[in-house]
Every structure is written in C-alpha cells, then in structure tokens.
Amino acid sequence: MTKKYEFPTQFFWGASTSATQSEGTEKGDGKGQNIWDYASQHYNHRFYDGVTTEHTSHFYKDYQQDIQLMADIDFNSFRTSISWSRLIPDGVGEVNQEAVIFYNQVIDELIAKKIEPFINLYHFDMPMKLQEIGGFENRDVIAAYKKYAETCFALFGDRVKYWFTFNEPMIPAEAGYLHDRHYPYVVDFKRAATVLHHIILAHCEAVKSFRQLELDSKIGIIMDVIPVYPRSQNPADLKAAEMADLFYTRSINEPILLGHYPAELKPILTAYHQMPAILENDLDLIASTEIDLLGINYYKPRRVKALDYEPNKAGIFSPEWFFDNYEMPGRRMNTSRGIEIYPQGIYDIAMTIKEKYGNIDWFVSENGIGIQGEEAFIENDRVEDDYRIDFLKEHLVWLHQAIADGSNCLGYHMWTFVDCWSWINAYKNRYGFYRLDLETGKKTVKKSGLWFKSVSQNNGFD
Ligand code: IFM
C-alpha cells in the first residue's frame, strides 16, 4: 500500500557511527594509539564522567551480534569508519593483520545480511604517532593519509561500493585548533586554516588514487552543514550571516564541491595575516577533484545577528569577530545538547545543494537527537522515545518535500545505531535506536528502532 510519505525506490535506510566511538579495544588487537585514546587518558577531566575510548560500545568484539541487531530493524545500509591507527598502528608503516581480519569480517557480515557498507576513512582519529609530528598541520601527513587510503582501497575495494574520505572535515581544524574542544587543544586561527587546507588536499589525493583504480564504486565526503539564518533583513544582520556562512560552511564546501575557495576569503585572511601557505599545485589539485556522492550531517541551524559592539582585535583572530550567535526567542531547543531543533533546515540544505552545487547525489549521513537521562523513559525494559520518533518524522517530512521539489537525495542515516561514546560528552547524551546498558553491555531496541524498521520496510510512512 502506498504511504503518504513514500521515498524513492532503493532509498538507503540505516545509521552511521565511527570506529573510535564504537569499536572499543581488546587485549592483543594490535591497535595503535590515536589522539582520542591519548586525550581521554591524559586529559581525562575533559571527558564526561571520565570515560575513555576503551569503553566504547565494543563493536570490535560484538560486531556479529550488532550487525544482526541492525538486520533486525531492517537497515539496508550502515556507515562506519576504518580506524587508521587500528589498520596501521603508527600511521605509516606495517599493516596490522588483526585489523585486516576484523574489517574483512565486518564488511562480509554486513553484505551477508544485505546491509550495504558505507566506509569512511577518517573520523577525527589521527594516529598518535602522526600527531606527534603535527598531524594535519604537517604536509607530510597528507602523503601518509594517501598511502593509508590506498591500502584501504586495495584491501577492501572489491566489496565496498561507497567510500568517504572524511567525516566533517571542518571539525578537526575548528575543534582541535581554534575552539579548544579536541586534542591538541590549540587556539590559533592560522594553524586551524592550515589544518583545513591540508585536509582538503588529503581528500583530493585520496580521490585521485581512487579514480586511478577504476573501481566500480563511488567516493564522496561527509560534511556537517549548519544552515545560517540572519536575525533580520537588516543589512548588518545579513552581513553577519554572510560571514558566518563564509567561515564555517563555504570555506570547506566550495573547494570540495566547486573546486575553488570562495573569493571573499583571501582578502580577509590576508588583511589579518591569517592566510595558510598554499603551494603552487594545490589549487589545481582542488580544481580537478570531483566527488560522486555527498553526505550531509544535519543537527541544527545557526542563527546569527550583527555584533552589538566592535570586538577587541588585539586578541586571537576569530570568525566570531564578524558575527554573533542569535538566540531567537521562542526557538525549539534540545536542552540536553543546548541546540535548536529546526526540521526545515534539512529542506533548505537540499535546496542549496540543488541550486548551488549542481544537484549532486547526496544523502543524509547523520541526523538525530541526543538525550540526557534517557533512562527516565524506560518502561518494561524499553526506552519509549516518542520524542525521537517525532524528531525523525518531522525531518523526513521535510526531506520528502525536498525530493518532491527535485533534490537528488538517496538515503537517510540516523545517528546512531546504538548509544555510543560521543567524544568529550562520552555517554552523556544517548542517540541510538538501541539502548546500551553501560553496566552489562546489553543492547535493547528502543521504540524508535521499531518505528524505523517499519519505515524501512515500507519505504515510507503515513
Ligand atoms: O558523535 C558525533 C559524530 O562523531 C559526528 N557528528 C555529530 C555526532 C553527534 O554529536
């Protein structure tokens, strides 16, 4: 029977996660340390309840049961990442054969259960040995990443049909080098801009290597897009919105999707002595790289207003010198995360992709709602998360409208399959279709997981 909100045939339904957030570590697994293993031990006070990466949801050990749980709620696709430091413990040298066995088993098990593996190469997890030489601030790490990507294509490229170079490429630069949230906790715009530029080049190098292999598969990147809305149509508010969009979205989307940096960026960065070093062939490489498929992570809008006063420009350069975040009265909030819920944002993003980025094939690669204290909603051993179902429905209704209006959206992945360790928030906010009991490790489906199963089965809902 047709559904009121029916999606295109072969629509991807599933969820996403990342290696560091889900695998955990096991004795003898041969994994090298990455920046999260290091930071969660050495800067433990920065992590909610002091939970380290060892205690993430044990996909390394439990992958078979986990994939069965995915099949139980009818996923037809699932994204995770390969852990660079698991596969190549020091980032550049020997391949860890235990990791090869593990990722082969995961990929084969997913395929056996008719779940298409979407494999991402980098999800915030720089191997510690490479961070010691500067991570992506050091151009040599681009070559190390290229080699790592080539190793993955050679090992798993016969079965993986959807590859992604990076998840949220802006975050390692912004959170690690400007806003003091991720290791190495540097606060320096020019260094952040250097990291971002090198990540873009690393992406291009991986895509170039991938193209040479002529595999029968697609490659893309996963972006977090925060659509910007000005407080008003006053020119000062409009200018503020333009600047927020320029720094946080266009500076990454345009090189990746249009092949060049926005023209407005260079004069500003030059005037403030913040231009990263761009070498002769860098811009040609960026111009000649195209992706096949774009993933969009959408969680919240960014509302912006003009600054109330001039900032003191004697301090560290910051995009926040040009705009202020606007707390719109009456906005609908997810108070656990302190972020606004705005389902229409997904439609606005779809229309921007259509109008500005050539209506490229894309999918929602993350969307979801993290809730603190979810145990309060447990009844008869099940989380009755009607708020998550409402959240999903509302976003899917707008996505459905976008598709009706011509957007080439190919799928929807929720964040996430089972409650996972979420970086500095660790297990504070729960996001999963399955609840993870931290004491016993037991995974129990939530009401939203069962609702999602019916959506996937029917390819839509009423
Ligand atoms: O946990 C993160 C994920 O790693 C990247 N996107 C946002 C998620 C929720 O905060």
Image (cartoon, rainbow, N blue to C red):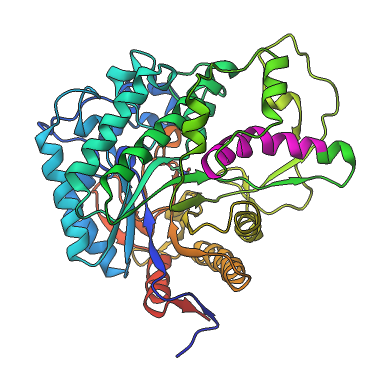
Front-lying residue, 407 or 135: 407
In terms of secondary structure, what is the magenta stretch mainly? helix
Q: At 74% across and 8% down in the image, what residue appears? A: 314
Front-lying residue, 373 or 325: 325
Asked if 420 appears above or below 1 in the picture, the reply is above
Name the quadrant containing residue 129.
Answer: top left
Residue 266, given in percent of the width and then of the height, sits at 67, 24
Residue 294, given in percent of the width and then of the height, sits at 47, 51
Left or right placement of residue 139 versus residue 302 in this view: left
Asked if 148 appears above or below 63 in the picture, the reply is above
Q: At 20% across and 29% down in the image, what residue appears? A: 88
Front-lying residue, 2 or 383: 2
Quadrant of the picture in which ligand 1 is shown: top left
Q: What is the magenta range?
A: 239-257
Q: Is residue 187 visible?
A: no
Quarter the N terminus occupies:
bottom left
| Residue 228 is one of the magenta-drawn residues | no
Residue 300, given in percent of the width and then of the height, sits at 61, 48
Q: At 85% across and 46% down in the image, what residue appears? A: 232
Name the quadrant containing residue 161.
Answer: bottom left
Q: At 82% across and 41% down in the image, what residue appears? A: 238
